[in-house]
Image (cartoon, rainbow, N blue to C red):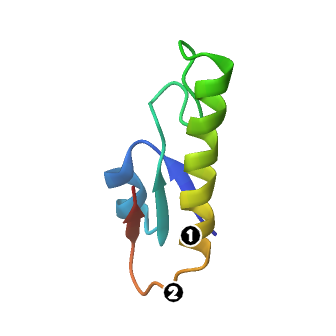
Amino acid sequence: MAQVCTMTPVAEMVGAHRIVTGSGIVHPLGLATASPEDEQRLRRRVLERALTALGTHVEKPTVFS
């Protein structure tokens, strides 16, 4: 499992192993002020990091940013 979040220290503290950095507190998977095209690119980057995290063997909390 990979957790997408913006407060990575909290995710590390609770023991999440694969932590993917989101784009912002209010909209971790997007940006309300971005154009639809820019938001789609941002979401794709977050998704690609999450997929990389899922394919990576980890022993301890690891942040993918």
The residues tagged by marks 2 and 1 sit, at their Cα atoms, a distance apart of 10 Å
Q: Secondary structure at mark 2?
A: loop
- Kind of residue at disc 2: His
Residue 22 horizontal side relative to residue 65, left or right: right
Above or below, 9 relative to 16: above
Above or below, 34 relative to 22: above
Residue 51 screen position, x and y as percent? 63, 66
Above or below, 37 relative to 53: above
In what quadrant of the picture does the C terminus appear? bottom left
Q: Can you tell which of label 2 and label 1 is closer to the viewer?
A: 1
Dot 1: few (<14), some (14–19), or many (≥20) neighbours within 10 Å?
Answer: some
**Residue 15 occupies quadrant:** bottom left
Residue positioned 62% across, 40% down in the render: 43
Residue 16 screen position, x and y as percent? 48, 67
In what quadrant of the picture does the N terminus appear? bottom right
| Residue that mark 2 sits on | 57
Q: Secondary structure at mark 1?
A: helix
**Residue 7 occupies quadrant:** top left
Dot 2: few (<14), some (14–19), or many (≥20) neighbours within 10 Å?
Answer: few
- Extreme-left residue of the structure: 9
The answer to whether the residues at label 2 and label 1 have Cβ atoms under 8 Å apart is no
Residue positioned 66% across, 25% down in the render: 37
- Kind of residue at disc 1: Thr
**Nearer the observer, 60 or 44:** 44
Q: Which mark is residue 30?
A: none
Residue 10 horizontal side relative to residue 16, left or right: left
**Nearer the observer, 2 or 33:** 33
Residue positioned 60% across, 37% down in the render: 41
| Residue that mark 1 sits on | 52
**Number of numbered labels in the structure image:** 2
Residue positioned 59% across, 64% down in the render: 2
